[in-house]
Amino acid sequence: MSVAGWRIYLEFERWRVTCPRCGGVYVERLDWLAKNPRFTQRYAMHVGALCREMTNKAVAELEHLHDSTVKDLDKVYMQKQVTRAGTAAPRAIGIDEIAIRKGHNYRVVVSDLDRGRPIWVGGQGRTEADLDRFFAALGAQKATRIELAAMDMWKPFRNSLTKNAPKARIVFDKFHIMRHLADALDEVRRSEYRRLAGKDRAFIKGQRYTLLSSRENLSHDGRASLRKLLRANRRLNVAYLLKESFGQLWSYQTEGWARAFFERWKQGLKWQRLKPYRKFATMIDRHWDGIASYCRPENKVSLGLVEGLNNKVRVIQRRAYGYRDEEYLKLKIIASFLPPLPRCDS
């Protein structure tokens, strides 16, 4: 028997009771015992704390347990974390979707932006009905108290929010908007590659990462390659400068100044033959209310959580080489943003 097995066996030997009437052997039910008779609550807390810092496989090897047992004990720990965190009643929410496996298989994630943590993961895709499930779980009374919602420009999400939380002001997530602009720049890069030939094309080949990355994130060699590329191709140079300058939009404190900046930015598109950028500008015009909303002081919330959530989910999935148990993945996402349980609970 493993060390963990002996520990559990000795714990239960102290509480076995023989019935004098029927001769049966029973175990007294105590508050500190877990529902599963094979381990104690304290041991579940110990394994759960390890799972916060280590992979499940490493914990299983350390504690001489089966992988499924580690997962069960981790669930007990995380459920206690969620219970301790309390019921959510958010003022400002962030709405996004995550890909749980290949093939455009998405789940909706709703975060409490004030508390900086996800509060719900669910649905079967990213439809209006999927987000409706969150509002059904939250309750109509709490939904009407939501004042602000940060999201991308996905229409089904907007429809669900307008229906279930009519008082909420919509702020379109700047990270998603900048991603659309990066896609437009990449489309310009591809069109230039197709148009050119010979030495002129050689400057563009293999430079996608260099062109789309922020300058401060590039290495010394990467910056040198970027300078060479922009000197060699005027259209890419203009597209790159327009993309870099657009981020200034979110620095304005009033909608009027933000709109004036955007109109000047659009003027820079004249005579440039940048069709993807003109499509992007048209999209911004269509969604202007949700973009300009961020300029108001009462709508200034940290949007980094919405963007960083996908990165953290990918780390969680990579640590476990993917999760087949979807409910476990959802619990893992929510609990990973909660503080560890105090030692006294272990």
Image (cartoon, rainbow, N blue to C red):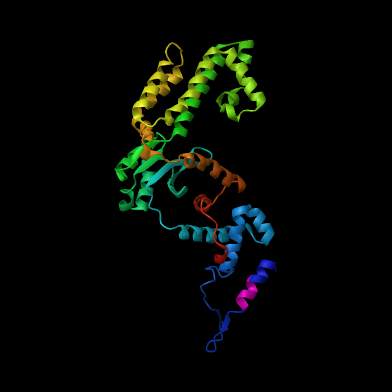
Residue 2 image offset from top left, x and y in percent: 70, 67
| Residue 259 point in image, percent of width and height | 36, 25
Q: Is residue 319 magenta?
A: no
For residue 48, above or below residue 321: below
Residue drawn at (51%, 16%) of the image: 238
In this image, 61 relative to 266: left or right?
A: right
Q: Name the image quarter holding the N terminus.
A: bottom right
Relative to 82, say whether 177 is above or below. Answer: above
Q: Note whether residue 346 is visible.
A: no
Q: Nearer the viewer, residue 329 or 22?
A: 329
> In percent of the image, x 69 and y 59: which residue is there?
62
Q: Which of 8 and 153 lies nearest the eye of the viewer?
A: 153
**Stretch in magenta:** 8-13
Q: Is residue 75 above or below residue 135?
A: below
Percent position of residue 296, x then y? 36, 35
Q: Position of residue 204 (x, y in %)?
A: 60, 17
Is residue 9 inside the magenta stretch? yes
